[in-house]
Image (tube, rainbow, N blue to C red):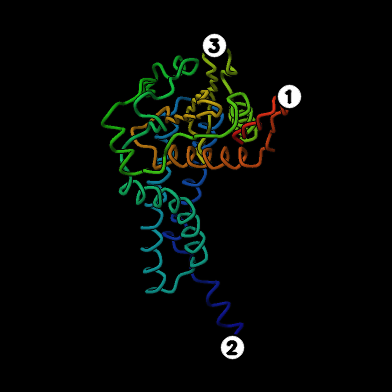
């Protein structure tokens, strides 16, 4: 009986809708991977790659509609192809899940792309400024008070980093963290007398698509301690979906952790009878 049922099922035609649902899903997956590959390795401009990626999302959505129609057809006429529909739906979910999450998140975040710990006097892009000219790139000039107000409302914890370590030590710690993260360092200038201002300019990449986001860091002396200001800005797009604020917040946490683990340095006692003053650690 089971053999007869199996033979009868095998003799049923495969649903054409199920076949097309799988084809569309596979094509969408290939197009999405190609667009990611193009952006990460810079083979083409960002805009054509994005058009390819959005096209892939459109084909994934179309595949879901065809798969649902195929499911109804199979349910009614008993044709084969349910496994093809399930495969198509799995691919479509993988393709659409993360963009869908980002789309929902973007509704809760301000449409700004330039985040800094010092909106009054933000660290400047100097070496990176020439990389932000043309091709639809955002300006290297800070957006101003409007962006600062939106940032303050959305990311109130983005503040300057005040450290109880000398400026050269603060610069070395920050430089080591940037190097560990494998950001592409474009320019590095250790603090030099008389101003004692150090600068680091680097390029970070977003995790999946690999979009370039530029980072500039300013380390200044503040009495016996130091202050670190950070600015992270997306090279493209008006909104960053919170990526720049998240990058700065993580960098602030890493710098504070590294500074706290720095061994305390003691002053050599002077021959004077007076007790030596404590040194900030």
User: How many numbered marks appear?
Assistant: 3
State the quadrant of the C terminus: top right
Residue 100 place in picture, x, y as percent: 39, 51
Query: How far apart are labels 3 and 2 at the CA level?
Result: 94 Å
- Disc 2 designates what residue? 1
Q: Which mark is residue 194?
A: 3
Q: Is residue 272 above or below residue 260?
A: above
State the quadrant of the N terminus: bottom right
Residue at 29% from the left image edge and 26% from the top image edge? 144
Name, please, the residue furthest toward the top: 194
State which mark lies toward you, 1 or 3: 1
Residue 6 place in picture, x, y as percent: 58, 78
Residue 274 place in picture, x, y as percent: 65, 29
Name, please, the residue furthest toward the front: 273
Residue at 48% from the left image edge and 27% from the top image edge? 214
- Disc 1 designates what residue? 271
Left or right position of 7 against 104 = right
State which mark lies toward you, 3 or 2: 3
Query: How far apart are labels 2 and 1 at the CA level?
Result: 105 Å
Point out the tag, 1 or 3, that comes first from the N-terminus: 3
State which mark lies toward you, 2 or 1: 1
Residue at 52% from the left image edge and 42% from the top image edge? 250
Point out the tag, 2 or 1, that comes first from the N-terminus: 2
Residue at 42% from the left image edge and 31% from the top image edge? 234
Q: Is residue 204 above or below residue 188?
A: below
Query: How far apart are labels 1 and 3 at the CA level?
Result: 30 Å
């Amino acid at each position: 009986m089971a053999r007869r049922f199996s033979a009868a099922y095998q003799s049923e035609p495969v649903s054409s809708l199920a076949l097309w649902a799988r084809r569309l899903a596979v094509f969408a997956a290939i197009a999405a991977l190609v667009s990611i590959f193009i952006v990460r390795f810079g083979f083409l401009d960002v805009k054509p790659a994005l058009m390819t990626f959005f096209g892939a999302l459109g084909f994934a959505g179309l595949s879901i509609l065809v798969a649902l129609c195929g499911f109804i057809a199979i349910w009614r006429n008993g044709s084969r192809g349910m496994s093809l529909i399930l495969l198509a739906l799995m691919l479509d979910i993988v393709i659409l899940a993360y963009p869908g999450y980002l789309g929902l998140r973007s509704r809760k975040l301000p449409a700004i792309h330039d985040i800094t710990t010092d909106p009054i006097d933000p660290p400047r892009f100097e070496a990176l400024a020439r990389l932000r000219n043309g091709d639809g790139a955002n300006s290297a000039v800070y957006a101003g008070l409007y962006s600062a107000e939106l940032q303050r409302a959305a990311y109130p914890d983005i503040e300057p980093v005040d450290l109880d370590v000398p400026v050269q030590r603060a610069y070395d710690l920050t430089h080591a963290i940037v190097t560990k993260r494998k950001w592409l360092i474009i320019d590095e200038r250790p603090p030099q007398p008389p101003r004692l201002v150090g600068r680091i300019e680097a390029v970070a990449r977003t995790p999946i698509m690999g979009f370039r986001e530029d980072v500039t860091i300013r380390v200044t002396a503040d009495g016996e301690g130091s202050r670190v200001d950070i600015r992270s800005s997306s090279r493209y797009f008006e909104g960053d979906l919170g990526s720049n604020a998240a990058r700065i917040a993580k960098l602030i946490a890493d710098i504070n952790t590294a500074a706290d683990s720095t061994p305390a340095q003691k002053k050599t006692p002077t021959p004077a009878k007076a007790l030596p003053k404590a040194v900030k650690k």
